[in-house]
Image: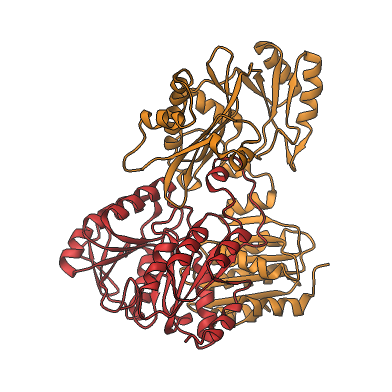
Chain colours: A red, B orange
Amino acid sequence: MSILMDDSTRVIVQGITGRIGSVQTRWMLEYKTRVVGGVTPGKGGTSVEGVPVFDSVAEAVRETGANASVFFVPAAFVLDAFLETIDAGINLIVVVPEHIPVKDVIRMRSYALEKGVFALGPTTPGILVPGKGKMGIMPASLFAPGRVGIISRSGTLSYEFAGILSENNVGQSAVVGMGADPVVLRNLADILELFQDDEDTDAVIVVGEVGGEQEEKAAGFIGRKMTKPVAAYIAGKYSPQGKRMGHAGAIVRGSSGTVDGKHEALRKAGVQVLESPIDVAHWAKKHKLR
Amino acid sequence: MRLHEYEALDIFEQNRIPVPHRGVASTMHEALQIAGEIGYPVVLKAQVLVGGRGLAGGIKTASTPDELKDMAEELLSAEIKGLPVRKILVCEKAEIAKELYLGITIDGYSGHPVIVVSTEGGVLIEETAKNSPEKIAAIHIDPTFGYYPYLARSLLRMLGLTQQLIGPWSDVIGQLYNIALRYEALIAEINPLVVLPNGGLLAVDAVLEVDDSALSRVRFSLPDRADRIENPLERRGREIGVTYVDLDGDIGIIASGAGLGMASMDIIGQKMKPANFMETGGGITADLLYKCMQLVMMKPDLRAIFINVYGGINPIHEGAKGVARYIAEHNVKIPIVAKALGNRQEETWEIFRAAGVHVVTEPATEKAVEKLYELVGPTR
């Protein structure tokens, strides 16, 4: 199977009765995703796009056999819903909403890791496996089935890279948004490992951006463990430096975070660094990817 | 949101961290009065939300009322790193036996709060981290386990300190950790934490940055956060709910998503210069993009606008209507190039084209930037 999900994954949508939740449920169903239920406390017994709605995650799991969940829950309620979802036995969670307090994300992350639940986000477009299904908001028209994996910190840039590849007749095995927040539920290296172990993936593209140290740490993993070709683009070369205050971050992270620092770490690990998104087409051609 | 030093010091004081006698002044006369109450010498500190303030001349010591008058007038009419000084903090001048460093931040990679301490506090702390890492110690706090005082004591023991300093310093660490939790701080920092001749500690500086996503639930009374942004265009961006960064070029940018916005800047920056960075996030409506157009157009001498949006969570056809309405109402003459892909892209292209926008339908942003360059040429 592809990484994380395929056409047998039984998905519930949390916040399904909301404006965004209901529209995105329709798009996911049109992409043939097995959306088996939805959850909105207080709206149990109704339905959205023909999908039954439940009051609790536990009930949804019991009635539908769901094993994955995608979130369109308002930011203030995400922590509570996330813990409920883990306790109900779901083992893949995609957290689409943005503006979730870091304190909540820290709690979510540690509980998910403790329980062995794979979670993506927050602020992620989700995951899309071309031809098999999608959990999240990725616009289907840009993706095509194939053997290249994409991991992106930015949502819209993941669409851009998939779009360029598809236009050049290079398909994707899976496209994963890891989330754009300063703390994410799973780190880049963990997702790279899934692609390395996936027999349907021949090569991986990492779409990163300035700040943090995800790419630097992932470079360590790539150097040690990855045998498949990896290319990386880092957005933010010309971004103005923020008016930084406080030294604690700089002391903890050292020189990490700059585009140049990330390029250097990735090159050392044997990664092909792409200076511009369109260069991904040449790279794919060079490696005869499809 | 970054708090001013005087605001952070008030919060520290309410939470039993020892802080100096002080007052905030907006005029020289206020400063004179506060200094009279505290007693000379006093330290005057410009209240601007930028780091490296001391080295930029924003901190002065006055020994007499005459000195204070001159210095206060000078500071209150100064700009520090481009920011006007509206207030100064007038502080008792502490006698310094030693300067320590204490900071608490979030380690993004592990997702843990981390406490950092050093016996070499002061403005050169980052140099110390690089050149003498043995003078810095840090400890990660497991969020499910939580903070306990022994963690601070063992952290300080790593620096080879005696119990005489470990006692009061670990108290301050516990108090600052509580503040960081309660105010949902991304950074809470005291640099320097001064050791007084009598062995007591005094926080003579205070940094507190509150997580923007948590502002609605953190309880404190502070003016609206948009008021803290000096640049009027950036302030307007905050008001309408988008991220806008003012730059010195002449190509306006509207993008959905920070990554796409940065990539657009990177590609445009190769031959032209962006006038701004802007990203809308996931809340595009016709009204929002109308306001985005209005904001981007506030920049003088703009030569073109570059729109780069995807229809995933965003209804881009609605956004296009807002752009079209702005163009029609304001008779916009400069070229607008738009790349808009995803859900309802054909509908979006039609609306853009009818409004005179140059639409690029290929997925690579480079192609759209080529079109832009063809229309306007390089930035001089």
Residue in the foreground of this view, choosing between A65 and A51? A65
Residue extending farthest to the right is B380
Work out whether residue B294 can be spotted: yes
Residue located at (55% from left, 86% from top): A285
Q: Position of residue B278 (x, y in %)?
A: 62, 61
The count of marks equals 0
Q: In the rendered image, which quarter is residue B253 located in?
A: bottom right
The quadrant of the rendering that contains the C terminus of chain B is bottom right
Question: In the displayed structure, would residue B16 be above or below residue A96?
Answer: above
Residue in the foreground of this view, choosing between A200 and B358? A200
| B139 lies left or right of B355 | left
| A27 lies left or right of B242 | left
Q: In the rendered image, which quarter is residue B372 located in?
A: bottom right
Q: In the rendered image, which quarter is residue B139 located in?
A: top left
Q: Position of residue B306 (x, y in %)?
A: 67, 70
Residue in the foreground of this view, choosing between B33 and B115? B115
Residue located at (65% from left, 55% from top): B245
Question: In the displayed structure, would residue A244 be above or below residue A7?
Answer: above
Q: Position of residue A133 (x, y in %)?
A: 34, 77
| A279 lies left or right of B138 | right
Work out whether residue B291 can be spotted: no
Question: In the displayed structure, would residue A105 be above or below residue B23?
Answer: below
Residue extending farthest to the left is A62
The quadrant of the rendering that contains the N terminus of chain B is top right
Q: Position of residue A139 (x, y in %)?
A: 45, 76
Residue located at (44% from left, 84% from top): A144
